[in-house]
Image (cartoon, rainbow, N blue to C red):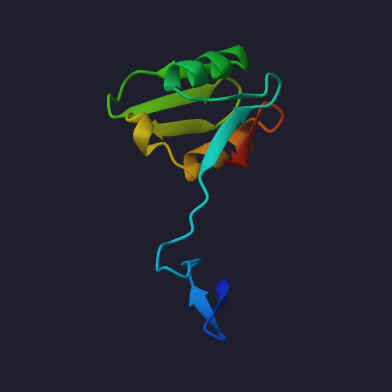
Amino acid sequence: MSGVWVFKNGVVRLVENGAAAGGEAVRRRKALVHTPSGQVVRSYAELESELRALGWERYYEDPTLYQFHKRGCLDLISLPADFARFSSVHMYDIVIKNREAFRVVDI
């Protein structure tokens, strides 16, 4: 059982899925950080530059995706073409495949 305990008018209740007292969802935003520089990745251009420095190559075959592959391994990073759809799932995929170079933080 997950959620937030809310005390209101002398009553304590559990609000499921992190919903706040006003009915608004409490949602933490995430950011991808390039660990060596400490900079937040704010665009695909920045991300591509950092990935290239780590030996990743970009595939241009599918215009709906940004895809990166690293020679000598089976890893593939697939990201939506629209940076606005870049989510924490994509961030963690990058972190898992580049443990020393990136991390995800709450903002």
Residue 34 position, x and y percent, is 63, 25
In this orientation, which residue lies closer to the viewer: 14 or 53?
A: 14
Can residue 81 be spotted in the picture? yes
Give the position of the C terminus as an image quadrant. top right
Considering every residue shown, the one lying at the far front of the view is: 9
Give the position of the N terminus as an image quadrant. bottom right
Q: Quadrant of residue 94?
A: top right
In this orientation, which residue lies closer to the viewer: 14 or 21?
A: 21
Horizontal side of residue 95 vs 57, given as left or right = right
In this orientation, which residue lies closer to the viewer: 58 or 73?
A: 58
Residue at 62% across, 17% down:
54
Residue 73 position, x and y percent, is 60, 28
Residue at 37% across, 30% down:
83
In this orientation, which residue lies closer to the viewer: 37 or 15?
A: 15
Residue at 43% across, 22% down:
44
Considering every residue shown, the one lying at the far bottom of the view is: 11
Residue 78 position, x and y percent, is 43, 33
- In this rendering, the count of numbered labels is 0
In this picture, is 35 found above or below 95? above
Can residue 2 be spotted in the picture? no
Horizontal side of residue 22 vs 72, given as left or right = left
Residue at 48% across, 66% down:
20
Horizontal side of residue 21 vs 83, given as left or right = right
